Amino acid sequence: MIFKIKNYIFGGENLKNLDYLVKELIKLPKETEWLEIKHNNSDPDMIGEYISALSNSAAYHGKNNAYVIWGIDDATHQIVGTSFDYQNKKIGNEELENWLRNLLSDNANFSFYDVCIDEKHVVVLIILKAIYKVVTFKNVAYIRVGSYKKQLKKYPAIEVQLWGKINRAKFEELLAKHDLQKAEVLALLDYSSYFDLLKINLPTDSDGIVHYLLEDKIIVKQDNGFYGITNLGAIMFAKKISDFPNIARKALRVIQYKGFSKVDTIRENVFNRGYANGFEEMVQYIEGLLPTREVIEGPLRKVYNVYPPISLRELVANALVHQDLSISGTGPTVEIFDNRIEITNPGVPLVDIKRFIDNPPKSRNELLASLMRRAHICEERGSGWDKVTLNCEILQLPAPRIDLYDENIKVTLYAHIDFGKLTQEEKLWSCYMHACLKQVSCEQMTNASLRDRFGVEERNKSGISRLIGLALSEKLIKPLDPKTAPRYMSYIPFWA
């Protein structure tokens, strides 16, 4: 007899469906490449190896999820209950889930759930299929061969095929919710914002609405006639991101601190709406926390933003669009200090940071980026970083700093700093960015243009000359024509 099990992804609140899932899975005559059954065995290393093996096997066999169920008799598949308590199990002083996440690769995505079935305690571990790369535990990749757990490297043919399937998978196309009625889809998504942002007339009936959502892969029609909401649809247009547990950690966090360090937190807010329907609210909230400056212009008192609004908007949009969605347990963060804003997102850029201005844009999330651009939230032509840097120059702010870490990129937007108080690194980076902006505008940097950029008077041009000389020695810039007289010398970026 052949059993067809539907793929499920659950929030902890959906115990009725979880109960149904367990009962359907244990109807299978034996364990599969994507299902492991246990009674009480809760060895931490065993669990870590199974998460790797089952996640990779789910990707190999075209399943969205894999499962480990405790409380089931291995031989009879009868529900017997389990003493496994994942919430209180510790390895040393560390909780089991944190211990596992520290030893698994960053793309491992899994959740434990408790459920009572026939008055017996059952634990279900739901594991999402591997995306972007194979899932490893303690730097070793595992795979299921039949019902056996094996090291992937011992099966090179399977490994090649698995990588091919992983490379074709897109996070945005995975399902965040399954088996929904049409009304349930429309209740979870802010579909009116979709039509407003894309400037499409709102259809008069639900069939018309669903048609557009299907075309843009916001939702999909399943083989069983029900609908699924994709990660793309949930992350862009969720009424509440928390309704979708697998992407809940991708919600934007905004933290404001007192002073220049993280010692004293003033407030923290997590935005629970989708990126598209909640973007304006995000930006307005951040702007409301930022200082302003008053300037007397004739008889009028005018208030100006300390940070250029266009730069802030572009940097927040970039953090959302270009993050590595495969890194679980983390998402984009905006941290506000008295003298700067730090915008961090998981993943490192696909373009050399020194070529942000001139290189064509690249995104690992093509569907997300395309939809954000069509919704007029981020740049379409790859000129976003140009706008960020140019608007900082207009206000004579330091060029935004870029810091790369193993799994994150952080961009820092500074308030005004006098030229004499800038560090050498800040001066060099701002000088290089100025040369890049001039180059893409078919102009060249000169001593005069750099003085204007920093707000330095002509009588102090020697300091600018020393900075240019340092940038030349660091090979960030080069003369347009080395034979030109020093007084008329102009400069271009090293790559021009």
Image (cartoon, rainbow, N blue to C red):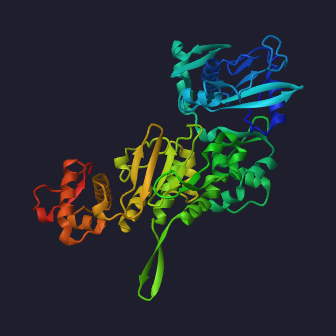
Return the x and y of residue 3 as percentages of the image width and height.
80, 21
Q: Is residue 52 visible?
A: yes
Image quadrant in which you'd find residue 404: top left
Side of 32 relative to 280 (left or right): right
Q: How many marks?
A: 0
Q: Is residue 420 above or below residue 175?
A: below
In the figure, residue 467 lies in which quadrant?
bottom left
Identified at 17% across, 64% down, the residue is: 462
Please name the residue shown 83% across and 12% down the image: 76
Observer-nearest residue: 113 or 378?
113
Q: Nearer the viewer, residue 235 or 90?
A: 90
Answer whether residue 442 is visible to the viewer in this image: no
Q: Is residue 179 above or below residue 147?
A: below
Foreground pick, 376 / 135: 135
Q: Residue 236 versus residue 85: which sits nearer the camera?
A: 85
Residue furthest to the bottom in view is: 299
Give coordinates of residue 405: x percent, y percent. Answer: 43, 40
Estimate the x, y position of residue 447 in percent, counting from the top left.
21, 64
Give the answer, above or below, for where 362 lies relative to 483.
above
In the picture, measured across the screen, residue 425 lies left or right of residue 363, that is left
User: Residue pushed farthest right?
Assistant: 118
Drawn side of residue 233 relative to residue 72, left or right: left
Picture quadrant of residue 142: top right
Q: Could you tell me residue 112's position as x and y percent?
A: 71, 30
Name the quadrant of the N terminus.
top right
